[in-house]
Image (cartoon, grey):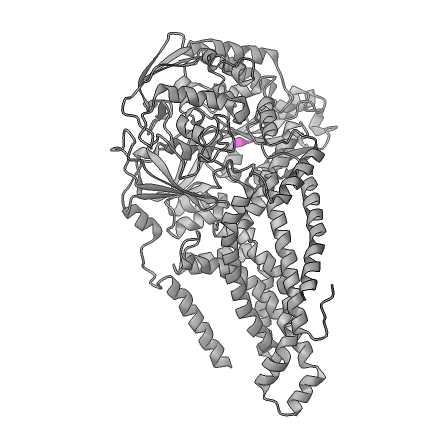
Amino acid sequence: MKPRIVFASLLLSHLLVGLNCGCSKRETPVERATRENILLMGNPGEAETLDPHLVRGMYAGIITTSLMEGLVIYHPTDDTLPEPGVAEHWSHSDDFRTWTFHLRDNARWSNGDPVVAGDFVYSYKRMLSPALGAEFADMLYVLHNAEAYHQGEIEDFDLVGAKALDDHTLELRLEYPMPNFLNMLKHFYWLPVHPATIEKFGKIDSRLSTWTRPENYVGNGPFRLKEHVTNKGIIIEKSPTYWDADTVQLKEVHFLPFDRHDAEERAFRAGQIHYVSRVPINKIDFYLENYPELIHIDDYVLTYFYRLNVTRWPLTDERVRQALSLAIDRESLIKNVSLGRERPAHGYTPDGTAGYSTPQEVEYNPEKARALLEEAGFPNGKGFPTMDILYNTSETHKVVAEAIQQMWRKNLNLNFTLSNQEWKVYLNSQRELNYDVSRSAWVAGYIDPMAFLYMWTSDNGNNNTGWSNPHYDALIKKAYQTSDIEQRHAYLQQAETILLQDMPMIPLYWTTRIYIMSPDVKNWNPKLLDNRPLKYIYLESS
Amino acid sequence: MLKFIASRLLQSIPVLLLIATATFFMVRLAPGGPFSQERQVSPVILEKINEHYGLNDPIIVQYGNYLKNLFKLDLGPSYAYQGRSVKELIAESFPVSLELGCYALLVALALGIPAGIIASLKPNTLYDYLPMSFSMLGICLPTFVLGPLLALTLGIGLGWFHVSGWYTLGDRVLPSLTLGLFYGAYIARLTRAGMLEILSKDFIRTARAKGVPEHKVIFKHSLKGGMLPVVNFLGPAVAGLISGSFVVETIFQIPGLGRHFVNAAFNRDYTMIMGTVLFYAILIVLFNLVVDIIQAAMNPRLRLHD
């Protein structure tokens, strides 16, 4: 029996090898894809939808910006510059409240229909239809009367500030001056949809429509949808009807959803994908040392911070909040713990966002921290209750929380416990102010300091700290109303200074975007928003 | 026999109803809803969305509607994947998990049974210790360790297989091995235990005394009885295998049901949670029934009772 088993296992192993041809020097999927002009991209998880108005996350949003094209699109190298999309050129009134866009004649939907100004008006109307329940319809509230229409206060969409003057001229009137409006306009919530297709598969406000299936999808972007199998992948291919099809060099792009970082990185090493969207934290140094040409670390507009629940004693005292911030050594945190080459935050808004300089109000000064704590009635931490740091379950957040716990113990003699909660439970706790200190992060949807600062006003649903300051609210309001960029930045700086002095949250660092990419991918530039127009990307074997 | 099957199926209806009810109320108890996310949705919009899905109705009304739809075999729309129905998502992903499960089962049986038999024939010798140590290793090594290990060695190291995706026949090998080895290890131990018990029985000694050749003793007289514990184990194991393993499916990026099962819970995709739980429950009920029938056929001391 024994020789037979040996023979059988030999046979089995040969069979297994044979299944995959057995030759070890065969062409990898990436090599083949480069040859065939197909970009293989890892994507963190499955896209919930490809309907630009109902998308919830950045990653699905990035795919929709390849399938649809807005008035202006992301610039290939500089996120603060507008690049003409469907709009060939545009103008604005002196007060930045009325914007006129001139649409190009040769813009086409993937079924051949011309793209007209009315399509954009229809799309804004759809996004703002109350029954559609678009999660982030408030992104369009900058349009005059949009909020009133969305809340059902007015029913006539003609009263909203979006008007097609003719097929190729679109006029947008804004609720307040918006010098950075073009940056906002690049966001996927401003993308158009094809009205006839929407109507064919439902009504303007049907949430459960099937128009996003590959066989139904009509877009106007450089690519069109070819295949979408949940959890398997999304394939988009070059659209022959796109007005600038000559620029588009990629034949196809495959977005492959990975639920785990390590699986995605393994797929890269096995030569199966060109691009790894997220790098496991323990692999960063390895790549930097051994394959610096493969790993990329770009600046990103994301602030990592700790919310403080200002309704809970003793966090009610701003001296205590300041002391906690002063006791954190951000340089050391970045160098030894988070490892992502982040920038230490000296304020909340990432410094340099659209030319804005962030006030320098945050520093590491343990002596000052101890003095403030003593002043607040806790000499050497005496009498301070044991408090808790909450974070959502993740190894990265855990190590940062442990480091902060350690710094507060060492510098202030304070005891903090750590607790982790599953994502939605954590969101719920944060919302209900059921925490002491809570890990948080905020990413801007568009390049503008306001995208960071608007959330700290008293009535904002994203504040979640219990903090409110009427001076802050007033300054934000003033900034909204001014059309002078310098003046606007000045108001925002004053507001941010108040925020940082009151300190309802402790900014830790401005993160980076870290990804691994094959050198075959060309014309891929670092972008603040991690949103690249794929029409400019090409592949070349290296 | 038919009467037995019919009565068992009828009995399963209240069981499934109970599971549906318990799941329905349990998922509502979990904090956070399907539409909560980091960037807060304004309360007005949330209200509209909830209205759209009937989530503003009193819970008991929602429960009634759910049961009504369930009897019409309508599992509702997925809350997480807009424009997709739960039925459609299960129909799309179950065949993948089923295929993976079948391969894994083959691997498990092909490795587990022979290893168990060999071990039982010469207990407490090298022939016993070697396969049993391996099986112990297989049981202790969780799939989230074994999977990446296999991917690193056979996939990246030797370049024989892809480490993710579900396209070619070769893509089936690593996930099937990962999943199959774990079950194979269990089966080996169960086979050994079952066989040892049978081999010590009087009728085996009689057979040997009468000069029946050893291979006949093993395959004809002992195997049937010795496999009973394995068959018992296989019922729920097969249901688990074919309904998808979240770990293996995420390690190898396989578009199966297991990923939906777990992600639905993370997403608070109420309808999808209900759909996958019920689907899994039905599989367990069915496979337990099949196991009972097979056991009755294999063990003359057992009878099927209504």
The residue lying furthest to the top in this view is A94
Can you tell which quarter of the image residue B235 is in?
bottom right
Q: Position of residue B274 (x, y in %)?
A: 62, 44
Q: Position of residue A319 (x, y in %)?
A: 65, 20
Q: Residue at x 58, y 11 (%)?
A: A471
Give left or right: position of A222 versus B291. left
B108 vs A221, nearest the viewer: A221
* Position of A504 relative to A440 (above/below): above
* Position of A236 relative to A154 (above/below): below
Give left or right: position of B94 versus A114. right
Q: Does residue A329 belong to the magenta stretch?
A: yes
The segment highlighted magenta reads A325-330
The residue lying furthest to the bottom in this view is B210
The residue lying furthest to the left in this view is A246
Q: Position of residue B29 (x, y in %)?
A: 69, 37
A73 vs A478, nearest the viewer: A73
Q: Position of residue A107 (x, y in %)?
A: 30, 26
* Position of A95 relative to B118 (above/below): above
Give left or right: position of A108 versus A418. left
Q: Residue at x 42, y 10 (%)?
A: A97
Q: Is residue A298 visible?
A: no
